[in-house]
Image (spheres, rainbow, N blue to C red):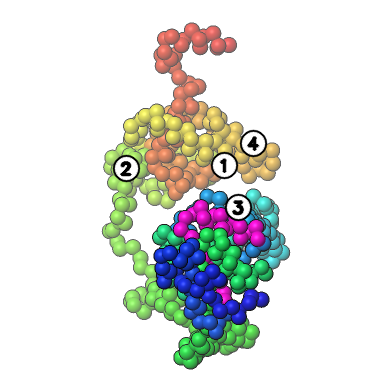
Amino acid sequence: MADHSHSETNPVTSTPHDEASPGTGEAAVRGVAPAADPKQPVAYVLAEYSTPEALVKAARQVYQQGYTKFDAHSPFPIHGIDDAMGIKFTRLPWFTFVAGGLGIITATLLIYYTNKEWYPYLISGKPLFSIPSAAPVMFELMVLFAAITTLLGMLALNRLPLFTHPLFQSTRFQRVTNDKFFLSIDARDPKYKSEKTIQLLTGLGAEYVETCHKEASAPLPWAFRTAVFLGLLLAMVPVSMVAWKRSTYSREPRIRVIFDMVSQPKKKTQTTSTLWQDGRAMRPWVEGTIAKGELKADDAFYRGLKPGGLNAVAATTVSMTNLVANQDGAAAAATPGAPATPPDPLDKLPWIENFPLEVTPELMKRGQERYNIYCATCHGLGGVGNGLVTIRAIELAEGTWVPPVTFHSEGLRKQPIGRMFHSISNGVRKMPGYGDQIPERDRWAILLYVRALQKSKYAPLSDVPPEKVNQLTDVAP
């Protein structure tokens, strides 16, 4: 323990620095401030220096004398002060490293037990635990644990937060943020001896030496203590209620804190309502109306029909249901000995012969891309009906598979482009309609690519550039 019986007077001269008179010598310009509260034990001895070089020199000598609990204070960083004080590398990075590892382990165990032990859901043959899929969570918990540990570790190693400090008693210490340099020695240092420590600092060129005493702790006001007690008591109320509700059963419904979000004033699908005369919550479409943006008046683009084509449909015996697909015609025709199917009423409709939008290389490329996604699985990349799904169905030989037609048949090559658009949109035979999956423009792009496939096998020689004719002749068998 430090010797607190010292009278705290200047060991060289009892005249403080502020009262020194000229001619008294070097000793007279150094002083020890009188104790602020001599009844309290000494906490620090504070020495003031005017230059950073003097501070570094003093710090090195103090460290060489065996002191370990001391610190240097400067208005700016000083090069070499760390080595002079013997400051060791901080332990904080090790705390961060260990916390990051714990975060990875925590995330791994959490994901493993959640997916494999507690909730083992088998979905499409996917593994219950996979390192690649768990890596994002492992990374996030690693960062979270490391960040929190770094912050709390920094505060703990620096003994923060510290709302007051004995050095703040010194009015001269305020100039440490401006133009003065200070060295403080903790009275808890094993080497600390009041007189010897002050003599050491004075001998190292200190301009002023001051002792800072511990501050007497005043009792907390009763109002503050009462408020803290009541606050802690109230904080236990919600915790107790949660624990009570989780450990007991109740016949009462749950407490709805935000009731208008749990029970919203709305009607769900297929429910009743007293608001309308028919008692239904769902309202039927108003006759003679159509949703905004759903008119689709362009028959050529949206339906593949010539202008006024819907009127022709209404004038025939073809109903809108028959416009979807003739599901039985192809199967009957494919069966040997089956009677011929009646003429398809769709053949009588005014289908368009040309594309209703501008044909461009970009549209062709888009059509090839969409064709490979939606059509090639059954029809094949060349449009001859040898897609992977078709090959697999033929291998299974279950008898329920209707082979897709080849686009290079004479019937399809001569079929109006509008009729083919209708088949893609609404389906034909066993092929389902793709109107809900593929937008109209993409459907026309697919048909443009199909026409290109047909053209590739049945293009007339006149369509070939003259400079390419000889090459085709050489290649032909």
Q: Which residue matches tag 4? A: 391
Quadrant location of the N terminus? bottom right
**Residue at disc 1, secondary structure:** helix
Q: CA distance from mark 2 to mark 4?
A: 37 Å
Picture coordinates of residue 221 (x, y %)?
47, 89
Residue 187 visible somewhere in the drawing: no
**Residue at disc 2, secondary structure:** helix
Snapshot quadrant of residue 292: bottom left
Residue at image x 33%, y 35%? 356
Mark closest to the chain's N terminus, 2 or 3 = 3
Q: Amino acid at mark 3?
A: Asp
Q: Amino acid at mark 2?
A: Asp
Q: Nearer the viewer, mark 2 or mark 3?
A: 3
Q: Which residue matches tag 2? A: 299
Q: CA distance from mark 3 to mark 1?
A: 93 Å
Mark closest to the chain's N terminus, 2 or 1 = 2
Q: Nearer the viewer, mark 3 or mark 4?
A: 3
Mark closest to the chain's N terminus, 4 or 1 = 1
Give the vertical position of 31 relative to 247 (above or below): above
Left or right of residue 7, residue 412 in this image: left
- Whether residues under marks 3 and 4 lie with C-beta atoms below 8 angstroms apart, the answer is no
- Whether residues under marks 2 and 1 lie with C-beta atoms below 8 angstroms apart, the answer is no
Q: Which residue matches tag 3? A: 83
Q: CA distance from mark 3 to mark 4?
A: 79 Å
Query: Mark 2 Cα within 10 Å, few/some/many (few <14, many 20+)?
Result: some
Q: Which residue matches tag 1? A: 331
